[in-house]
Image (cartoon, rainbow, N blue to C red):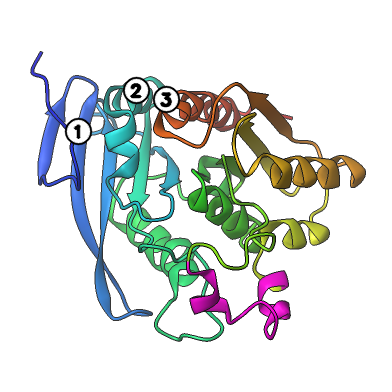
Amino acid sequence: MKRFAFAGLLMLAVIFVKAGTVDTIEVYSNAMHKKIKCVIVKPAAYETAAQRFSVVYLLHGYSGSYAQWININPQGLTAKADEMNSIFVCPDGGFGSWYFDSPVDSSIRYETFVSKELVSYIDQTYKTDASREHRAITGLSMGGHGALYLALKHKDTYGAAGSTSGGVDFRPFPKNWDIAKDLGDYTTHQKNWDDNTVITLADNLKNGDLHLMIDCGVDDFFLQVNRNLNQKLLDKKIDHDYIERPGGHNSDYWANSILYQLLYFQTYFTGKLK
């Protein structure tokens, strides 16, 4: 088997690997008037099978790109796509978009892009099962926030959602990651911050709305906000999986944790999660 080195931004058109194919595509966003790159991982059976395939959307972290997930664990992702017989979609979410539609900058529309434009494009272009029962979303760090945020706002689109090391409440960090650029300064635009953070959106969640898988390393600076979200879900009696494991906020943790997230989605797609 050939070995491929994945470094920096993934510069490829199509790479053939043992478990299937990894493609880089561009999808035009009418909301943001630009082309956005995405990595698409397809299982080996994709070209020959007559079936429709489940889809998992994987969101990258702050300062990452569409290539982050495939760089972190290329063999693991391609093998899981084959094992799950599913398609993985890794969109570019900008340097620090946090995957919302900015209330102060009309050029930032990553909620619209990912959950409407991209989902529509993928379902029209690929052999997908377009039901929410066969569509899941997860991500790391900023992408963990984005995945839960989008799933909570679009429960008709996603049936399952996850987060690994997610910034599920960024309000304790008002000076970090350029969030104020897209929401306004926290002291003067607190409502924008409240309305666009996961832990607040969870107030409207009902048990059974979504299947949720949340994990965080015990040495992660986002550990406390994940514990707070877990407690809120427990208080609301929302069924979910929550895991704390050894590890910090780094690629070693994410390369391992994504395999557990995908196992959870695999179980969901087969109808075995109740």
Residue count near mark 3 (Cα–Cα under 10 Å), binned few <14, some 14–19, many ≥20: many
Q: Is residue 71 above or below residue 57?
A: above
Compared to residue 146, the image places residue 15 above or below, namely above
Q: Which residues are magenta?
A: 178-194
Q: Is residue 272 visible?
A: no
Mark 2 touches mark 3? (CB < 8 Å)? no
Q: State the count of labels.
A: 3
Using a 10 Å C-alpha cutoff, classify the residue at mark 2 as few (fewer than 14 neighbours), some (14 to 19) or many (20 or more): some
Q: Which residue is mark 1?
A: 21
Please state which amino acid type lies under the numbered disc 2. Gly
Q: Earlier in the sequence, mark 2 or mark 3?
A: 2
Relative side of 72 to 14, left or right: right
Q: Quadrant of residue 37?
A: bottom left
Give residue 154's quadrant in the image: bottom right
Provide the residue designation for mark 2.
Answer: 76
In the displayed orientation, state which residue is furthest to the front.
175
Q: How would you rate the neighbour count of disc 1 (Cα within 10 Å): few for under 14, some for 14-19, many for 20 or more?
A: some
The one of 97 and 153 positioned closer to us in this rendering:
97
Q: Residue at x 35, y 39 (%)?
A: 69
Q: Which mark is residue 84?
A: 3
Distance of label 1 from label 2 (alpha carbons): 13 Å
The residue located at (76%, 46%) in the rendering is 229
The answer to whether residue 208 is above or below residue 123 is above
What type is the residue that disc 3 sits on?
Met
Viewer-side label of 2, 3? 2
